[in-house]
Image (cartoon, grey):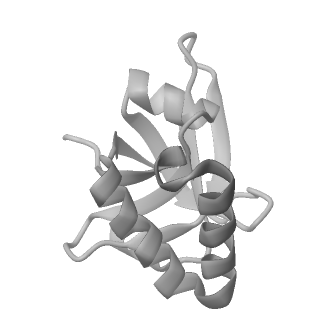
Amino acid sequence: MITELGRGEYLLLTTFRKDGTPVPTPVWVAPGDADDVIYAWSAKETGKVKRIRRSGDVEIGACDFRGNPKGESVKARARLLDDDASDDVRARIVRKYGFMGWLTMTGSKLRRGRTGTIGIEITPAST
């Protein structure tokens, strides 16, 4: 299931506030080399990154670019990556999304620098 979500156009990544309130956010997603590993990308100072830093428990599902769900969501684990691994995630996003991916990554790098964004690794939740 997670591998299929990595092939989709957008991923609805739902993180949770301390009080348990869900916060869904549509993000670009790229498949990993291994089954059941996908990657997303975000600016480091966003709420979703802060919530993942606190707890890697997330829910993921397919969505459109506005974040409207396109089916069921599944529980997963998110892990923030170091700068080198985040470079790999940015390259995966560029390969998948082509010119728009390149434009977005380049603009982000100019605004925030190389370390202003972070890769997010998403794997199935432990059973």
Residue 22 location (% of width, % of height): 62, 29
Residue located farthest toward the right when viewing the structure as drawn: 66
Residue at image x 42%, y 76%? 92
Residue name at image x 52 percent, y 80 percent: 94
Q: From this view, report whether residue 120 is shown above or below residue 23.
A: below
Query: In front: 115, or 69?
Result: 115
Which quadrant would the N terminus be assigned to in this image? Answer: bottom left
Left or right, 107 with respect to 98, comes to: right
User: What is the tally of numbered marks visible in this picture?
Assistant: 0
Q: Position of residue 37 (x, y in %)?
A: 28, 64
| Image position, residue 89 (x, y; %) | 40, 66
The picture places residue 27, in percent across and down from the top left corner, at 61, 58
| Residue 70 drawn above or below residue 75 | below
Query: In the rendered image, which quarter is residue 45 located in?
Result: top right
Q: Is residue 108 left or right of residue 1?
A: right
Residue visible at 41% across and 28% down in the picture: 53
Q: Quadrant of the C terminus?
A: top left
**Residue visible at 59% across and 83% down in the picture:** 97
Note whether 42 is above or below 35 in the view shown. Answer: above
Do we see residue 72 in this rendering? no
**Residue 38 seen by the camera:** yes
Query: 117 and 69: which one is in front?
Result: 117
